[in-house]
């Protein structure tokens, strides 16, 4: 083996000061996630400003369905990375290679099945969600193009999760930077110059994702400790069972959470196209402000997974407490623009003054509770990284019921404000549940070990 390859391209998070390790791992993840969000933001700006607000509503109307479909399979790929991080932390490279091979097979089979089912039910899902008729055709076209590229999107995420499980958060960052610039260029070319409409935005994103996938795959090929051999492809049922045990609950959690988001989208669609356009743009903005918490979550997941494999449980607790402090301070600060400058932020994407005023019902509420979202994205991946994925899955069910209950109580009287309250209520309920669960699991594991 070439020793420099394994040392240079992977990172052992079982040594060193926990908070420093998390920060170092977090920064590239954060920047990478920001560039990934630029896909959606650039699409929104160019479609909204380059075409019109109806086209923007058409793109936004696919968001909940994409979360439902891709959230499941991408969640599974994230769950599959947990045993990889455990094996890497334990320095069991033979098991690591075998785990990667079996995970690749699982992802291939599940993606193929989901692709066929999704294309068949795409139109029916949009009808069930009361997608407005004046944007229905554009919405369906955009969704189908995105679904055609499912394999590209899924395997990019698979390679990125694998790299992160090995402690490499820099490569996905570089891939996202390259892809973001490609996406911006192609968005302008396809939508503004060639006038391809919403289809152009969809094609631009898929082509950019291809470059991300290729870049990450090339980097993986340079890591000698995961150089898969012929024997590694032989079916190993215990490893497959272990992978499904961690992967499926994470995927199901994402899908259940997505159903709650679809309920909100259903309610908003019923209010009419202006509300759908406003909700779409507002959630794009909120999504951008959520990225620091999401990046902390990925860092905590890798940190927890590697240290659990190495049986360094005290480090896990230290890392989680550090991450909670970091995410609280960070989200209180970055939530302020959403509270103080909602009109200025939403004007970047929307043109209609009425729609801009509507957005002021959503952004301040999200900004005020961004810290709760941050807590959720620390304690959930911390538990998942230790291999405890069942209760985090049920937290998705709690989010679903919280969203449904809140929107049923507040939606009719408060409109988009009720939608915003329903969203942040789901964050808060889930994070309280998982905060208690993480420390319960930590104490249980430590007692059983010592």
Image (spheres, rainbow, N blue to C red):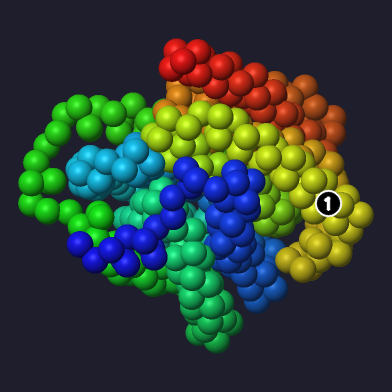
Q: Is residue 61 above or below residue 5?
A: above
**Which residue does the image show at 56% across and 29% down from the upper left?**
314
In the picture of the structure, the residue carrying the numbered disc 1 is 333
**Which residue does the image show at 53% across and 82% down from the upper left?**
185
Image position, residue 303 (x, y; %): 51, 42
Viewer-proximal residue among 444 and 264: 444
Q: Quadrant of residue 228?
A: bottom left
Q: Alpha-carbon neighbours of circle 1 within 10 Å: few (<14), some, or many (≥20)?
A: few
Image position, residue 371 (x, y; %): 76, 40
Kindly tell me whether residue 257 is visible in this rendering.
no
Q: Is residue 271 above or below residue 195?
A: above
Q: Quadrant of the N terminus?
A: bottom left
Q: Is residue 118 left or right of residue 110?
A: right
Viewer-proximal residue among 248 and 118: 248
Numbered circles on residues, count: 1
Image position, residue 411 (x, y; %): 77, 31
Q: Is residue 434 left or right of residue 105?
A: right
Q: Is residue 393 above or below residue 231?
A: above
Image position, residue 85 (x, y; %): 38, 42
């Amino acid at each position: 083996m070439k020793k420099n390859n394994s040392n240079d391209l992977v990172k052992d998070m079982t040594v060193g000061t926990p908070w420093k390790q998390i920060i170092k791992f977090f920064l590239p993840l954060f920047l990478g996630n920001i560039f990934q969000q630029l896909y959606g933001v650039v699409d929104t700006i160019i479609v909204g400003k380059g075409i019109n607000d109806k086209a923007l509503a058409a793109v936004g109307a696919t968001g909940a369905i994409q979360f439902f479909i891709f959230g499941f399979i991408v969640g599974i790929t994230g769950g599959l990375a947990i045993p990889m991080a455990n094996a890497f932390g334990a320095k069991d490279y033979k098991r690591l290679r075998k785990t990667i091979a079996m995970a690749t097979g699982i992802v291939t089979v599940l993606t193929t099945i989901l692709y066929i089912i999704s294309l068949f039910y795409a139109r029916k899902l949009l009808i069930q969600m009361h997608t407005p008729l004046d944007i229905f055709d554009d919405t369906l076209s955009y969704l189908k193009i995105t679904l055609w590229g499912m394999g590209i999107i899924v395997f990019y995420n698979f390679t990125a999760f694998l790299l992160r499980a090995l402690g490499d958060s820099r490569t996905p960052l570089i891939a996202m930077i390259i892809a973001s610039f490609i996406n911006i260029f192609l968005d302008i070319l396809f939508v503004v110059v060639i006038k391809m409409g919403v289809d152009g935005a969809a094609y631009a994103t898929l082509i950019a994702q291809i470059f991300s996938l290729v870049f990450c795959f090339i980097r993986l090929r340079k890591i000698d400790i995961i150089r898969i051999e012929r024997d590694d492809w032989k079916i190993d049922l215990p490893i497959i069972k272990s992978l499904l045990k961690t992967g499926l609950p994470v995927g199901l959690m994402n899908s259940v959470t997505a159903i709650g988001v679809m309920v909100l989208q259903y309610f908003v669609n019923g209010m009419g196209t202006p509300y759908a356009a406003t909700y779409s743009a507002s959630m794009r903005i909120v999504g951008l402000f959520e990225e620091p918490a999401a990046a902390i979550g990925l860092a905590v997941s890798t940190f927890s997974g590697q240290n659990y494999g190495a049986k360094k449980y005290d480090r896990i607790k230290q890392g989680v407490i550090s991450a909670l402090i970091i995410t609280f301070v960070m989200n209180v600060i970055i939530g302020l623009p959403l509270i103080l400058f909602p009109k200025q932020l939403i004007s970047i994407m929307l043109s209609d003054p009425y729609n801009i005023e509507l957005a002021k019902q959503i952004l301040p509420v999200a900004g005020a509770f961004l810290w709760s979202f941050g807590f959720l994205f620390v304690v959930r991946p911390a538990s998942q990284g230790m291999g405890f994925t069942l209760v985090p899955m049920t937290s998705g069910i709690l989010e679903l019921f919280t969203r449904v209950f809140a929107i049923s109580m507040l939606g009719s009287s408060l409109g988009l404000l009720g939608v915003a309250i329903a969203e942040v209520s789901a964050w808060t309920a889930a994070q309280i549940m998982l905060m208690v669960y993480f420390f319960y699991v930590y104490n249980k594991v430590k007692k059983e070990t010592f």
